[in-house]
Structures are given as C-alpha cells and as structure tokens.
Amino acid sequence: MARGRERTAGEERGESELIDRLVSVNRVAKVVKGGRRFGFSALVVVGDGKGRVGYGSGKAREVPEAVRKATEQAKRAMIRVPLRQGRTLHHDVQGRFGAGAVVLRAAPPGTGIIAGGPMRAVFEALGIGDVVAKSLGSSNPHNMVKATFAALQQVCSPRTIAAKRGKKVSDLVGRREGVEGARSE
C-alpha cells in the first residue's frame, strides 16, 4: 500500500511539468425511454515538452469529467520519441490509422510547426519546434491523432540504429552539410 502512495506523490510532482491540449469535445446522445440522454466525449493530448507524449479519450455526462478521464488515460499511455537537437524529427516518416494518414517531415531551424489542428496539439505537447506535416485522408481528430502516433513510434535515432547494427553513429550519419560548410570557411 505504501508503495502505491509514494508513486502517486511522485506522479503529482511530474504532473506540474506536463502540457495538456484538448483536441476535441463531442456531444453524444443516447436515446432512452424518456427522450435523449446527453454525454460528452473528449480527446486530450498530454506531453512534457521534452520528447514524451500520450493521448487519451474519455466519456462522461459533463465536459470537465470527460476531460479529466481523457487526461488520466493520456498520462498512462505516454511514449518517448527521439528528437534531433531537441527540436525536430530525425527523419521523414508516414503513419496510418483507419482512413487517416499523415506524413511528417523533419525541418530546418526556424520553420516552426506547420501542421493542422490535432497534429499541432501533438507536436506542441511533444516539444517539437520545427516540423512539416500533412494530413491525407480522414480529417477525423481521433484518426489524425492515432495516425500521428503511429508515425512517431516509427522514428528512430541514429544511436539506436547504430546499436542494432553494431556500428558507430559516425559510420551511419557521416558529415552534415552545415558542419562541412562551417569548417571550410
């Protein structure tokens, strides 16, 4: 029992750093004998701004309760995404979920987040500063967020690829154009 309480206290300290974004709220109706009973579903994205992000959905009779449930689910389902220089992706990647498909591209410094609503919320919570994204297919927020997460789970850093192949990072990456240009001047 004590262990569970300690973990909760640790989570509360970490929660203050988390960024949460409400992506969508939808009113849903259940038809019952006396008429319609309304409820709300919420889609929330939570991240620490340093490479960890998660999403969750919740349903309740009131909006704040639905948002709270979605936030709790998002905190439990966080994934880590490796970032290049803490601001962009290591490589271009595509993701697909249902009828929704997304293309995420790494971008040079100063580009900013060029992405539509639900994807923008994911990138802001993740802490990506420069990325170009395009949504193809479904514009349903749930499908777009899930497709974005499918793409982000495919991102690998050169360090992990080098470790898998048993090589050095320098063998894989080589010299970048910016580094060579700075040395020749």
Image (cartoon, rainbow, N blue to C red):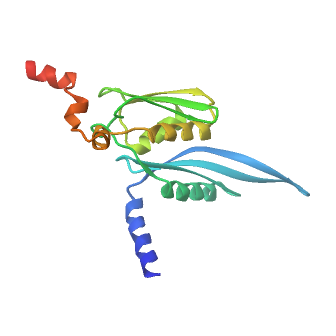
| Residue situated furthest bottom in the rendering | 1
| Residue nearest the viewer, comparing 12 with 89 | 89
> What is the total number of numbered labels drawn onto the structure image?
0
Q: Residue at x 62, y 49 (%)?
A: 42
Q: Is residue 55 left or right of residue 171?
A: right
Q: Is residue 93 left or right of residue 109?
A: right
Q: Residue at x 46, y 52 (%)?
A: 78
Can you tell which quarter of the image residue 111 is in?
top left
| Residue situated furthest right in the rendering | 33
Can you tell which quarter of the image residue 3 is in?
bottom left
The quarter of the rendered structure image containing the C terminus is top left
Q: Is residue 11 above or below residue 86?
A: below
On the image, the x and y values in percent for residue 165 come to 30, 39
Q: Residue at x 40, y 38 (%)?
A: 155
On the image, the x and y values in percent for residue 169 come to 23, 37
Can you tell which quarter of the image residue 68 is in?
bottom right
Q: Is residue 68 left or right of residue 155?
A: right
On the image, the x and y values in percent for residue 24 come to 60, 43
On the image, the x and y values in percent for residue 130 come to 36, 31
